[in-house]
Image: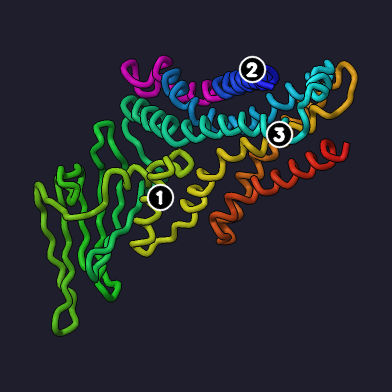
Amino acid sequence: MKTIRRLIYREVITAVAFVTLAFLALFFFFDMVDELRWVGRAGASGYQLSHALLFIALSLPQHLYELLPITVLIGTIFVMARLAQSSEFTIMRTSGLGPWRALSTLLMLGCAFVAVTFTIGDYIAPASERAASLVKARRLGQISTGATGAWLKERQGEHSFAVNVRAVDPNGHLRSIRVFEFDARGRVASTLQAELATFDDSGQAWNLQQVRRSIFEQQANGDMRVTRLQEPALQWPTRISPDMVSASLLKPDKMATIDLFHYIRHLEANGQEPQRYAIEFWRKVFYPLSCLVMVVLALPFAYLHFRSGGIAGYVFGGVMAGISFFLLNNVFGHIGNLQNWSPWLTAAAPGLIYTLLSLAAFGWLVLRR
């Protein structure tokens, strides 16, 4: 049985690697076409073709993370169908490879793909995405999100603060900062604007530069007194860390699981709705496990009987099944966010649906034959 397992593992890994390289080459071409619009915009010393190629190369791990369950399905279907077509799988069955042993063999291989997917999605892809953003920021100017930048919220005692960071420059400095302070009754207590901010070494404050402050004080007669101050530098105490700012500027699907967890706790502690990030957190947890579902879904193809030329149709079916899983995963995420569904159920639903389909196919095509 060791020889049979080694044969199946070698064939599946080779097929999955080939399919993955083909998809990555396709995404590389699409990204290259998209990046060409930025080349040369900042002059001769700005964003050039070499920088675009580096940016795209650093973006490939994120594509690899998204593609792995799909390519595992396509590659495994191709191998199982080819073994069935050449009657090799029939010989394996007569040699003692029963349905449950075949299933356990593929599940062991699927666990390896789960580990690879988790490692890429949680460690390699977030680091490469930050590096890619830094490459573009150094050549095009700064990192920002949306029209107004990133918004964060913090509570200090009875007062709450809404913080707006317009952008982060290539050196990691915050640009165009606005801080709105609200008292216990929800009224504006002060506003603060700064051109530049850096993080204090203690991690408990921001060092602001070119500061303009407006302090609102309620007088005994009911009038509002406004005091305006200008200061060259000011240390503003806050627990908002660099990781929290980075999290608000990055897309949730490009963050590591532990970063998402800490950011969700920060949002909950400050009375903000973490639904979008909670869904992405549970998707990060469940997405690697979909590789197990894919190998189970591919196993029944080894028990089908067809003549020469039939593999292409089954591989095409595998491609459609993989694409449908990817689309269903994204659709459930958006619907769950809009309908305020349970985050873990929203993230797990596509995998559960495909698990039922794979078990139904395994029971109908394998166990009943």
Give the residue at the far bottom of this rendering: 221
Kind of residue sitting beneath label 1: Phe
What residue is drawn where x is 16% and y is 65%? Answer: 215
Q: Quadrant of the N terminus?
A: top right
Residue 15: in magenta span = no
Q: Which residue is mark 1?
A: 261
Q: Earlier in the sequence, mark 2 or mark 3?
A: 2
Q: Which residue is mark 2?
A: 10
What residue is drawn where x is 47% and y is 23%? Answer: 56
Residue 44: in magenta span = yes
Q: Which one is in front, 291 or 208?
A: 291
Q: Position of residue 331 (x, y in %)?
A: 63, 47
Q: In the image, is 350 to the left or to the right of 125?
A: right
Q: Which one is in front, 17 or 150?
A: 17
Q: Position of residue 159 (x, y in %)?
A: 24, 68
SS category of the residue bearing label 3: helix
Q: Earlier in the sequence, mark 1 or mark 3?
A: 3
Q: Residues within 10 Å of mark 3 (few under 14, many from 20)?
A: some
Quarter-of-image position of residue 311:
top right
Q: Position of residue 114 (x, y in %)?
A: 55, 34
Residues rendered magenta in the picture: 30-51
Residue 362 seen from this side: yes
Q: Position of residue 219 (x, y in %)?
A: 14, 79
Q: Which residue is mark 3?
A: 103
What residue is drawn where x is 36% and y is 48%? Answer: 150
Per the model, the C-alpha gap separating discs 1 and 3 is 34 Å
Disc 1 or disc 2, which is closer to the eye?
Answer: 2
